[in-house]
């Protein structure tokens, strides 16, 4: 590894990392590990861990030489997952691997990671940058993220709190997020499109800009619901596999969700993908979030307060459906 380039890279990102620090961070960069002190006030704290990547969305970022948004994606994919257990994200670590260290390129990635961490309220506690000559082509890199959150044991969500008759409330996605990009890239290639193309439906935005839109973070509005003592029974982060695969993950045994597809309008990016790629409605729902990025399950008596709280925070939300007896299905998609 180019030692001098590595040192220069660390120096360049040091201020970005420190800007994410929150109470609990001990020490600084440069050690063999990051240290975080469990906050005071917890009686039986449970640590919740999550890890994820960005998938082949990285191919698009590298093709367009735009790297900030995938850094934010990385944080959102991990922190949103941790949040579904009822946990508040505490800190985040990243792993970046490349064939040859390009400090400008990876500094953009870390800048996006830092933005995501600040928005999520978690510290960027550390990370690893691996230079692996001959393993990755020039200009390419891969990355993974790791997030740790904390929750009181009695408030940990595991599906047992969800009851038949509970109401599912949807929060919108910002677009495709970070799943389904192998299909996205196939549709673009097979259709003879370029990332610089600007289909009229996107009102001046290029395909590259549309599909680099970063994943939405849901941490702050959900934590505010908890602070207002709104009792959340379950949460789902809608990632790969869409609503059919992810929504049942927050339910209890012998439960399903019946949703009303007419309660929201499918965002135009998904309409365009379906038409451009001649993709069936079933395959679209099995691959993409279709405009629903996160789901909160509450009792019927808390629906009004939940929607009011989210609205006060300028967070769009709507009633998606209801928990019913069943076998872990999502009914009413089409």
Image (cartoon, helix red, strand yellow):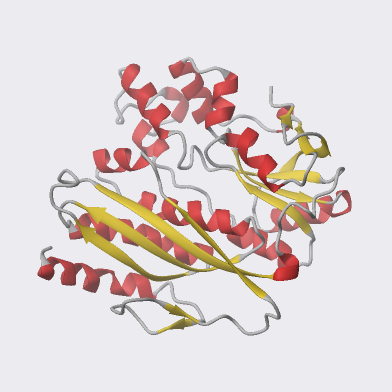
Work out which quarter of the rendered image holds the N terminus and state it: bottom left
Left or right of residue 211, residue 38 in this image: right
**Picture residue at 52% right of the left edge, 68% below the top:** 121
In this rendered view, identify the residue nearer to me: 174 or 101.
Answer: 101
Residue 206 can be seen, yes or no: no
Tell me where residue 260 appears, x and y as whole percent: 76, 30
For the image, the number of numbered tags is: 0
**Picture residue at 44% right of the left edge, 18% below the top:** 277
Tell me: residue 122, above or below residue 285: below
Q: Classify residue 19 by image quadrant.
A: bottom left
Tell me: residue 32, above or below residue 260: below
Left or right of residue 296, residue 210 in this image: left
Tell me where residue 147 appears, x and y as whole percent: 49, 63
Tell me where residue 105 appears, x and y as whole percent: 23, 54
Tell me where residue 212 appears, x and y as whole percent: 39, 41
Left or right of residue 146, residue 223 in this image: right
Left or right of residue 60, residue 230 in this image: right
> Which residue is the extreme one toward the top?
278
**Picture residue at 69% right of the left edge, 22% below the top:** 334
Residue 260 can be seen, yes or no: yes
In this rendered view, identify the residue nearer to me: 228 or 83.
Answer: 83
In this rendered view, identify the residue nearer to me: 225 or 244.
Answer: 244
């Amino acid at each position: 590894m180019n030692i001098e380039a590595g040192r220069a890279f660390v120096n360049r990102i040091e201020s970005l990392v420190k800007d994410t620090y929150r109470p609990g961070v001990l020490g600084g960069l440069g050690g063999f590990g990051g240290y975080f002190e469990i906050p005071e006030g917890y009686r039986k704290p449970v640590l919740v861990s999550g890890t994820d990547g960005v998938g082949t969305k990285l191919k698009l970022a590298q093709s367009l030489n735009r790297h900030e948004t995938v850094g934010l994606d990385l944080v959102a994919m991990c922190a949103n997952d941790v949040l579904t257990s009822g946990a508040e994200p505490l800190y985040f670590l990243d792993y970046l691997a490349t064939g040859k260290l390009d400090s400008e390129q990876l500094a953009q990635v870390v800048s996006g990671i830092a933005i995501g961490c600040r928005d999520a309220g978690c510290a960027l506690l550390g990370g690893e940058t691996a230079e692996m000559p001959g393993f990755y082509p020039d200009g390419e890199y891969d990355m993974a993220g790791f997030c740790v959150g904390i929750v009181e044991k009695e408030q940990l969500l595991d599906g047992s709190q969800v009851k038949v008759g509970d109401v599912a409330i949807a929060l919108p996605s910002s677009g495709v997020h970070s799943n389904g990009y192998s299909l996205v890239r196939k549709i673009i290639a097979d259709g003879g499109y370029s990332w610089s193309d600007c289909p009229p439906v996107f009102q001046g935005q290029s395909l590259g800009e549309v599909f680099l839109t970063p994943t939405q973070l849901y941490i702050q509005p959900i934590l505010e619901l908890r602070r207002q003592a709104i009792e959340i029974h379950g949460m789902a982060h809608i990632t790969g596999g869409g609503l059919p695969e992810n929504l049942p993950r927050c339910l209890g045994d012998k439960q399903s969700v019946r949703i009303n597809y007419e309660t929201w309008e499918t965002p135009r990016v998904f309409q365009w993908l379906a038409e451009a790629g001649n993709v069936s409605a079933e395959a679209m729902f099995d691959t993409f979030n279709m405009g629903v990025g996160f789901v909160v399950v509450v009792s019927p008596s808390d629906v009004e307060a939940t929607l009011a709280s989210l609205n006060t925070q300028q967070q769009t939300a709507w009633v998606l459906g209801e928990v019913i007896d069943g076998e872990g299905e999502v009914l009413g998609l089409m």
